[in-house]
Amino acid sequence: MPVRKSFDAVAGMALRAVPAFALRAGTAFALAALLAGCMEQPSRMSTGAPLSGAVGTEDVMAGSAARSNLIRDLQSRNSVLPAGGPFAVIAEQVLAASKGAAAAELRVAQLKADAQSKNWLPQIGPSVSLSSLSGLVAGLVLTQPLLDNGRRKAERDFAAADVEVAAVGLSMAINQRVYEGLSYYINAQRAHAQAAVSRRAAEKLAQFEDLMKARVDGGLSDMSEQQVISQRYAEVQAQLAADAQAAATAEAQLAALTGAPLRDMRGIDSIRDMRAGPPALSVLRKQGEGARVLAQVQLTKSDMLPGVTASADVTKGDTNTGLRLTGLGILNPGAGDTMQALRETATVVQRQNAEAAELAQRRLVALAGEIDTLSSRAATGAQVLAQTEANLELFTEQYKLGRRSLLELVGQYDAFAQLQRDQDALRFEIALRSVEIARDLGLLVDGERL
């Protein structure tokens, strides 16, 4: 029998029968449950996946246990961090020390969704009324919406969308936390690499300074030349101290995040290109929020449209059963504009989702472009560095033959050391951009662990 015809037939019998006699409590409960089963439409997740058949106990339980496409998408994502590498080790340490509130928020949302999955059942509550000046009469009231214009389904959809938003929030929080740990580690490794260059430069400049002092003492050079080398040596020493401080600060931040000092690890991993990866987490969050908004719209519409609710009041063994008309908000003067605004909300949500996807794509393209630029600079810089190193060797030979001054040799070595520092920084900048893309796409942690 079609749902609408079934409802009309049963509701008609109920309307004719209620004024005639009072139903017993068990009969009222069965009638309310029967009408609810006839009226309830097939449940649907917030992503639009239908559940077949009329709503019953088995269907509601299956709908509660089923996961949406959005959550399945989150759980299907695999980490791009190479297994066994330093990045994966840092990620494990960060996850082990995670104390974020996002997991608790997801748990609360799941409990609310489980509670709403049972909203098709009749509600039973106490009824207390004043019968006279000297006493109270207590009983039980059983209520069951018969025509709710999709309100209970919207409540379930809202709760399901709330779970989706909380799930995306958990993924974003965990990926952000892992990103912070990896950024601390990468910054520490960059500081260590640049400190090694500064240390070698300081040692070399110390040798040049000693040589210049000997030349000044021998009358072959004046004090102005020695001051130039001493000043450059002091600058390199200060640079070395700054690199050491930067490394110590980054390692302290990482230790505070993981709850344990950083193990003796060196090096960084290479992360694969992710331009053809899944949608960004920000896009999924906007989709979940949009589904929640649409469910709220349906709740508002159902409150405005006329509805019918059956109730049974059991007091002192008597059962009083009746029907109640609800939701007459459609009769207010601004109802037309309100309904039109609600109908156009779907267009707003659709456009917001499109804007979020466009913004995420632009950000991905920008980060990928930065990686390409840095990679190009690294390739060009490697050639320049090799040429500068060859020139330095030539300057050294010419200095030994007396064709170059010591200051010229110091200037050439200073240029080589600075170029080497810049070249070393490029690969760490590339690693930071790659980790940032992986964070935005939710690819720093396996989705199955969320």
Image (spheres, grey):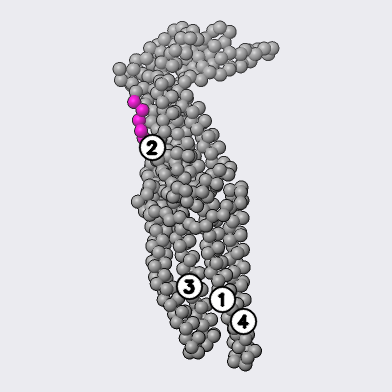
SS of the residue at dot 2?
Answer: helix
**Label 1 vs label 2: CA separation?**
61 Å
Decide which of 139, 441 is in the foreground and name it: 441
Q: Which residues are magenta?
A: 47-52
Mark 3 — residue?
Answer: 419
Q: Specify the quadrant that holds the N terminus.
A: top left
Where 163 sits versus 364, above or below?
above
Amino acid type shown at disc 4: Asp
- Compared across the picture, whether 161 is left or right of 253 comes to left
Which residue matches tag 4? 210
Q: Secondary structure at mark 4?
A: helix
The answer for how far apart the CA atoms under marks 3 and 2 are is 50 Å
Q: Which residue sits at x=57%, y=10%? A: 315
Q: Nearer the viewer, mark 4 or mark 3?
A: 4
Q: Residues within 10 Å of mark 3 (few under 14, many from 20)?
A: some
- The residue identified by callout 2 is 69
> What residue sits right under mark 1 in the picture?
204
Dot 3 amino acid type: Leu
- Identify the main secondary structure in magenta: loop
Q: Which of pointers 3 and 1 lies earlier in the amino acid sequence?
A: 1
**Quarter of the figure with residue 377:** bottom left
